Image (tube, rainbow, N blue to C red):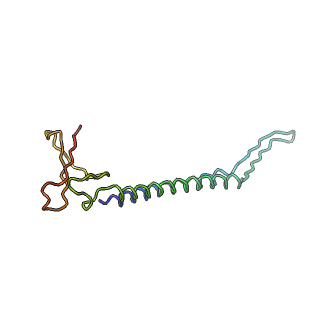
Amino acid sequence: MDLEKIAKRKAGWANFAVAMAGGLGAVAANANANRTYTTVGRSRFGSYYSQTTVRDNTAAAVGTAASIGGAAYTMSRINHNLEQTLGSVQNEVIQTTTVDPRTNYGGMLVLDKFKVAKNSPGRLELVIRRNAGDEEGYRVAFDLKR
């Protein structure tokens, strides 16, 4: 799978989760804005019971703003990290057209996952060729550790 698609998919799911959490936080802030006060007392005329519910819209507004603002900031950080990742992928991943035999190149090489047999040697050698006729190619060796 393409590295850009993977990064975009992960960022999309992270943004979705943050948006859901921000929305739930706003709902919780609105639900918490209602306060109920109960009074029970006795007088010489008998006992009395009073219950009063007060809605504090300021608390609801502050809680909602904090929840939505936090979610928006987190989503902007996710998108910023996505842009950095995409820039890194475009600038540092070795492409088949950028490797010249017998020259140096700095960057990052990304391979798909592969399985190595348990009894295989402890060294993996990767040969990168510009084309099928390139016999020497560019050799990179890795020591396999378990």
- 122 horizontally vs 34: left or right: left
Q: Residue furthest front?
A: 103
- 70 horizontally vs 49: left or right: left
Residue under the image location 23 percent in, 57 percent down: 100
- Give x and y (percent) for residue 91: 36, 58
Q: Relative to residue 136, is residue 44 depicted above or below?
A: above
- 38 horizontally vs 90: left or right: right
Q: Observer-nearest residue: 42 or 131?
A: 131
Q: Residue furthest right?
A: 44
- 6 horizontally vs 99: left or right: right
Tell me where residue 8 sits by quadrant.
bottom left
Q: How many marks?
A: 0
Residue under the image location 43 percent in, 55 percent down: 84
Q: Relative to residue 46, is residue 10 depicted above or below?
A: below
- Give x and y (percent) for residue 22: 55, 54
- Give x and y (percent) for residue 36: 71, 48
- Give x and y (percent) for residue 35: 70, 49
Residue under the image location 77 percent in, 47 percent down: 50
Q: Quadrant of the C terminus?
A: top left
Q: Quadrant of the N terminus?
A: bottom left
Residue under the image location 20 percent in, 47 percent down: 115
Tell me where residue 130 sits by quadrant.
bottom left
Q: Residue furthest top?
A: 146
